Image (cartoon, grey):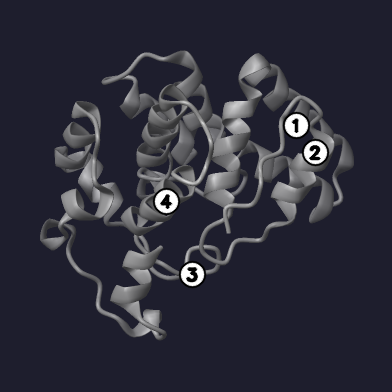
Amino acid sequence: MKYYKSQLGSNRTRMKKTPIDRVDLESILQPETALERRLIQDPEFRRGLGWGIPRFGHPEGEVYKHIREVLDNIDRFDISADEREKLRLITFVHDTFKHLEDKSYPRDWSKHHGVYARRFLERHYDDPVVLRIVELHDEAYYAWRHKHLYHQHWEGTERLRRLLDAMGDDIQLYYLFFKADTQTGDKNQAPLKWFEMVVKDIEVVPSVW
């Protein structure tokens, strides 16, 4: 968070976008594992890191700046080294393929950026829990949106049920990522508060803000 605020100042929308090849991703993202370093050197991955302009929910603009914010949040959790490593990897990958996403209506959910991210990560990593969270990382938000924005209560309940069934005993790790991801930028906090209230099998952690 400190990086993009210092770089963008108070009038972020007028700043010129820096080409990703001129961004020092090593210094900003501070990779800690061989896989993290390999990812930020991959040309396909780097294209995704440079995508994005300031917008609601993501005033920071580019994906790599959002990743930095989420990583900072993860560092505020009291978690094991293994959990931290998994959450960092999810963070690196989760939004990096938004530039490929097809948002035409009706939605083809096989073209969601989480699906593209999972397919990419499968070439490098095989932990099924991490892959599942990468693919489904927006599902909690979509369940909330059905119920509270669209007033489609059955659809929202079913979407949440499918998410909980998919995550099973790993719902706490999913929740930690959802919290770290949601408490960034100027995102609406209502989906996170709702999730913490309705999901009984999680241990709610303090705000990272």
- Mark 1 and mark 4: Cα distance apart in space: 27 Å
Name the residue at 76% across, 24% down.
Answer: 201
Which class describes the residues within 10 Å of circle 4: few (<14), some (14-19), or many (20+)? Answer: some
Q: Is residue 44 visible?
A: yes
| 37 w.r.t. 141: above or below | above
- Mark 3 and mark 2: Cα distance apart in space: 26 Å
Q: Quadrant of residue 86?
A: top left
Residue at disc 4, secondary structure: helix
Mark found first going from the N terminus, 4 or 3: 3
Q: Position of residue 38 (x, y in %)?
A: 17, 32
Q: Position of residue 187 (x, y in %)?
A: 60, 61
- Mark 3 and mark 2 in contact? Answer it, CB < 8 Å: no
Q: Position of residue 181 (x, y in %)?
A: 53, 48
Of residue 148 and residue 86, the one placed in the foreground of this image is 86
Q: Which of pointers 4 and 2 indicates the residue nearer the eye?
A: 4
Labelled disc at residue 156: 2
Q: Position of residue 40 (x, y in %)?
A: 20, 41
| Residue type indicated by callout 4 | Asp
Q: Quadrant of the N terminus?
A: bottom left
Badge 3 is on which residue? 55
| Residue type indicated by callout 2 | Gly
Mark found first going from the N terminus, 3 or 2: 3
| 163 w.r.t. 4: above or below | above
Q: Quadrant of residue 90?
A: top left
Badge 1 is on which residue? 160
